[in-house]
Image: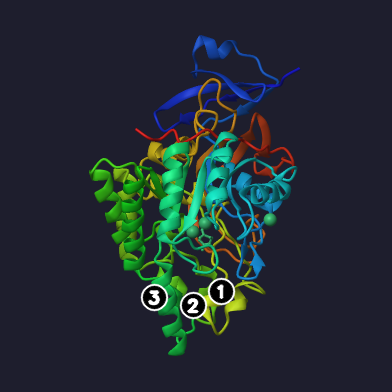
Amino acid sequence: MTTRTLVRGGLVVTAAEETHADVLVEGGRIAALAAHGSGAAAAWTADRTIDATGKYVIPGGVDAHTHMEFPFGGTFASDDFETGTRAAAWGGTTTIVDFAVQGVGHTLREGLDAWHAKADGRCAVDYAFHMILSDVDDSSLKEMDLLVEEGVTSFKLFMAYPGLLYSDDGRVLRAMQRSALNGGLIMMHAENGIAIDVLVEQALARGDADPRHHGEVRHVLLEAEATHRAIQLARVAGAPLYVVHVSAEEAVAELAAARDKGLPVFGETCPQYLFLTVDNLAEPDFEGAKYVCSTPLRPKEHQAALWRGLRTNDLQVVSTDHCPFCFRGQKELGRGDFSKIPNGLPGVEHRMDLLHQAVVDGHISRRRWIEIACATPARMFGLYPKKGTIAPGADADIVVYDPHATQVLSAQTHHMNVDYSAYEGRTVTGRVETVLSRGEPVIDRRTYTGRAGHGVYTPRSTCQYLG
Ligand code: URP
Ligand code: ZN
Ligand code: ZN
Ligand code: ZN
């Protein structure tokens, strides 16, 4: 017998509309919506009724950029798929797309198999994979085609980190040419890593070893230059391009200029760039290390351009780039040398809340919140309309969201496996109350009711956002 659940009395918010509607869930999917108070809705019977009066009923969040157990700088991101997806559920995110990594000298298949082994049977919510290409050659290019066919339809390349994940322009171009043929989407880490490494060496030679120098050497113009170069290479290849973790105003301008020409160029930013600044990197007693990520946090002036880009659709997606490292024992690896601080910030739990705060603050509309956090990431990465919306036939990934509750973000209360919060002490308005993943309650009125292994691997189609 399939369970029928009725989510009753809330304001259903999707990217397209807002309606006072009741939602009927059956067999893990959304069976029907009907206007609250209508005869149709009144006639529905259910095994379980969730009262959403005074609340929003929104699609589960789709976080298209996470790094569970990511290997970096001799250590691993501190959330594994179990702890990381549980924290995602607490924050109203019901799908993550994580980055499987091709090791240098290894095949894509080996990298993908390794990520399946880490994730399978451990996730609280559904998951999918992108593939990081760290070794572009004839055989990995051929393998891209196979991955696209089986549902890994996007590939990250790094113009940063020479000697580690870096691809030179020739490799970038070849991967883009391949993606133009096989329908894959290239995701670009756009920073000029060769130039950055020169500045790193010079800074350390001068004795500038504190975390704040991480922000200085990763210059805004080196993000803008790489963004420009990536766009031109994509044009030459005839391929679409998605630039990840955009932080600099000058990079947004490159994206906007390309989009004004009608090019299929897309951009993502992250809550850390919208809410944190270089002042965090300058916090004393090495506390700035907590905020080391790449691209780096920028001066506050850049935030206006990011918010504007989100409003004008020059930026389409907000993901977290969740890549947590504990302060004790992990970030501390870079005491005395900022270049040895593992790069990445925790955030998978707080994206939906911080973006709701942006609604409260007037930066974006309520529907735009759902668009950049749920619908567009689902379309961009081939998960729509199964994920990212509330409509008949979609997976019943539903969040009952209390827009009036306030909460204080803190490492004392968060669920991510990391010993600090990048947002410690910040009060936000809005809080997840109940979360359904394919109809199953994983958070029930602020209690975790999910389990490791409920979340399933979700193969993706190619990008649905083009055009
Ligand atoms: O600092 C970051 N962003 N760490 C994760 C890896 C990446 O480049 O996305
Ligand atoms: Zn191998
Ligand atoms: Zn990156
Ligand atoms: Zn990342």
- Rounded to the nearest angstrom, the CA distance separating label 3 from label 1 is 15 Å
Pointer 1: what residue?
Answer: 341
- Placement of 390 over or under 365, stated as above or below: above
In the picture, measured across the screen, residue 52 lies left or right of residue 192, that is right
Q: Is residue 260 left or right of residue 169?
A: left
- Residue for point 52% across, 54% down: 136
Determine whether, in the image, residue 162 is placed left or right of residue 361: right
Location of the N terminus (image quadrant): top right
Task: Note whether ligand 1 is within 8 Å of mark 2.
Answer: no
Of residues 405 and 165, the one nearer the viewer is 165
User: What is the three-letter code of the residue carrying label 1?
Assistant: Ile
Image location of residue 93, percent across then percent down: 57, 43
State the SS at label 2: loop
Image coordinates of residue 42 in percent, x first then y, are: 56, 13
Q: Does dot 3 land on a helix, a strand or a loop?
A: helix
From the viewer's side, name the closer residue of 284 and 167.
Answer: 167
* Location of the C terminus (image quadrant): top left
Q: Mark 2 vs mark 3: which is more N-terminal?
A: 2
The residue tagged 2 is 211
Residue 189 at least partly seen: no
Number of marks: 3
How far apart are labels 2 and 3 at the CA level? 9 Å
- C-beta proximity under 8 Å, tags 2 and 1: yes
| Residue indicated by mark 3 | 216
State the image coordinates of residue 4 (x, y, percent, origin top left): 67, 20
| Residue lying at 67% horizontally and 74% vertically, measured from the top left | 329
